[in-house]
Amino acid sequence: MITNDELDLLLADLLDHYGYDFTHYSRASLTRRVNRLWHISKFLSFAALRHRLRSDADYAGQFVEGITVNVTEMFRDPLFYQVLRRDVLPTLAAKPFIRIWHAGCSTGEEVYSMAILLSEVNLAHKSLLYATDLNSEVLSKARKGIFPMAPLKQYAENYRLSGGTQDFSTYYTAHYGYAKFRSELGEKVVFSTHNLVSDGSFNEFDLILCRNVLIYFDKLLQEQVLSLFDQSLAPLSYLALGSKETLKFSSLQPRYRQLNNEKIWRKIG
């Protein structure tokens, strides 16, 4: 089991050698994930783990992928997508162009969900999605738009509960246990690495989605990232967070109005 002091050393190595700053991530979550990687890799000592991390960039990349959280699904939290479909996207329809940022998009399931939504409300032609993540490996998977078939039944049910009325299977082609989603869904998506800890704003957006990422940050880093989103949001635009995340207790709260008790806030100030 890694000690607090040993974890501090690993985090310092990741920052000094590779530029990844995890120093304000939740300690409990990091400890669990590092212990899991230590067990899987069967290092006999902390010194062996640390030496491999400092001397092997490929292993360091795998290590970073292992301690970052990449859990997602299509149309996750269907009621959330109902609100997007019914209350958010119609208010953006009058704009000549719509920019949407999926921050911490992981393997892209929610990005393709949004592409389907935009297509169904006839806004895809004037929309651009920016899908970013710290982890280049998961972005590579997201670009392909190919997902395992096993959870597709659940995804189809999520889609139906979110207000979808089409046959969900029309959006993909099944082949050897994987579903390849229609290529036009990915044509309006720009996939790029972006580090929420160290990188700045890169455009002005009408909607930012960052779901189930802030829960892995400490309060100081949460406030820093929320400020980044605030700088990146146009007036009367929207910020969407995960089911266990909130703007409450943030310094930004007075300038945002929550929609229908869902984790979506509109910038009003």
Image (cartoon, helix red, strand yellow):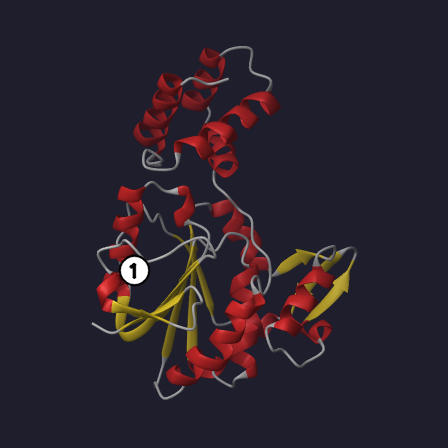
The foreground one among 40 and 80 is: 80
Residue 64 is situated, as x and y percent measured from the top left of the image, at 46, 35
| Residue appearing at x 55%, y 27% in the figure | 37
The residue where tag 1 is placed is 229
Q: Residue type at mark 1: give it.
A: Phe
Residue 23 is situated, as x and y percent measured from the top left of the image, at 32, 33
Residue 254 is situated, as x and y percent measured from the top left of the image, at 22, 65
Find residue 248 and report its image quarter: bottom left
In this rendering, the count of numbered labels is 1
Residue 267 is situated, as x and y percent measured from the top left of the image, at 28, 71
Q: Under tag 1, what secondary structure?
A: helix
* Residue 122 can be seen in this image: yes
| Residue appearing at x 44%, y 16% in the figure | 51
Q: Which residue sits furthest right?
A: 176
Find residue 265 and report its image quarter: bottom left
Q: Would you place residue 35 above or below residue 265 in this image?
A: above
The foreground one among 107 and 7 is: 7
Q: Would you place residue 129 above or below residue 247 in this image?
A: below
| Crowd band around label 1 with a 10 angstrom C-alpha radius: few (<14), some (14–19), many (20+) | many
Where, quadrant-wise, is the C terminus in this rendering?
Answer: bottom left
* Residue 59 can be seen in this image: no
Q: Would you place residue 52 above or below residue 166 in this image?
A: above
The answer to whether residue 21 is left or right of residue 114 is left
The answer to whether residue 165 is left or right of residue 150 is left
